[in-house]
Amino acid sequence: MDLKGKNVIITGASKGIGKAVAMRLAENGANLVLAARTQSTLDETVKQIKDKTGVKVIGVATDVSKLEDLKNLVDITTKELGNIDVLINNAGVSSQYPFEKQPLEDIERLAHTNYLGYVRLIRLVINPMIERKQGSIINMVSGSTLCDPIPKTFVTYSSLKVGLRAFLKGLFWELRDHNIKITSILPGVVDTGLTDKLDNITKDQKDRLMSPDAVVDMVMFALSTPNNTCPLELAVINQQTPWTKPIIDYKQAQAR
Ligand SMILES: NC(=O)c1ccc[n+]([C@@H]2O[C@H](COP(=O)([O-])OP(=O)(O)OC[C@H]3O[C@@H](n4cnc5c(N)ncnc54)[C@H](OP(=O)(O)O)[C@@H]3O)[C@@H](O)[C@H]2O)c1
């Protein structure tokens, strides 16, 4: 896909992986609508991208766990930019605990952000894409879904990502009939705010963390394949991650 002038929504775009994706897409000429909850960091990111690339970038304060916010995001995008060519579903939160210690409110927050946030936003953008017989939807899932059983102390987070991955795999086949592309990205551990509790542990083993750029490369690959092909899933895993211990231990991760 030639990204010049294409209209793209990115959720969770003010920091980490989403911000890195936004910068690369803007460098390739895409117009962007960036969504995140915190207005100040969102404004800062919008300004940085505009200053560096000169493309059209709009920030819309959005909590993806709220249906009304998602509707507002789609309405503003359509009004300001027109058709939505690409959706990057990326906003996500983490919560690592042995299940008996996991705060009850975290369970609801994870489900509403990491699962419902993705599914509902796809539902809101999909009909115009079907009418135009074109569109690409890229979703940040997780490399932890490759483990069976899913990693200890991550069971709520990972099981929701497993459910999301299953949903997206089914949707891939359903929407393929309408020429819509659905791709899941499965990253290993990436150096972002989501994993900042790992700073102490990984200070002598930085190689265990991937740069967000490794994930951005997967997004760019998904958007660059020929029109009649679509990568269903792309996993990018750090070469230093031990297969038997894919996630950093709970005790270590809590230590700061
Ligand atoms: N980092 C990793 O190791 C890793 C590995 C595999 C998969 N992933 C997935 O990759 C995605 C991005 O993670 P990241 O590491 O880049 O995280 P991050 O650095 O913590 O950034 C998360 C972004 O999402 C936004 N966000 C969080 N909750 C939101 C909500 N309810 N509504 C709207 N925006 C929200 C944050 O801004 P506000 O807080 O201002 O809303 C921020 O812009 C997540 O889905 C995560 O599960 C990450």
Image: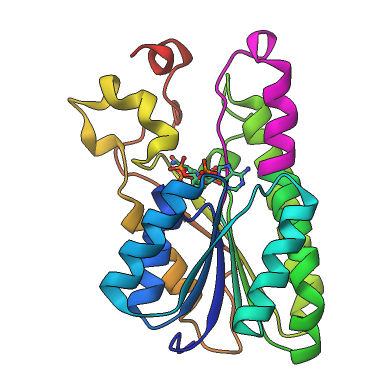
| Residue 96 drawn in magenta | yes
Q: Residue at x 75, y 47 (%)?
A: 66
Horizontally, residue 31 falls left or right of residue 212, namely: right
| Residue 239 coordinates in the image, percent (x, y) | 31, 44
Q: Specify whether residue 221 is in view.
A: yes
Q: Nearer the viewer, residue 184 or 242?
A: 184
Q: Quadrant of the C terminus?
A: top left
Q: Nearer the viewer, residue 150 or 200?
A: 200
Region of the chain picked out in magenta, as a range: 91-113
The image shows a total of numbered marks equal to 0
Tell me: residue 106, above or below residue 31: above
| Residue 37 coordinates in the image, percent (x, y) | 57, 46
| Residue 107 drawn in magenta | yes
| Residue 52 coordinates in the image, percent (x, y) | 26, 71
| Residue 59 coordinates in the image, percent (x, y) | 52, 62
Q: Residue at x 61, y 13 (%)?
A: 98
Tell me: residue 152, above or below residue 69: above
Residue at the farthest left position: 204
Tell me the colour scheme of the image.
rainbow
Horizontally, residue 234 falls left or right of residue 108, namely: left
Q: Specify whether residue 217 is in view.
A: no
Q: Residue at x 75, y 29 (%)?
A: 108
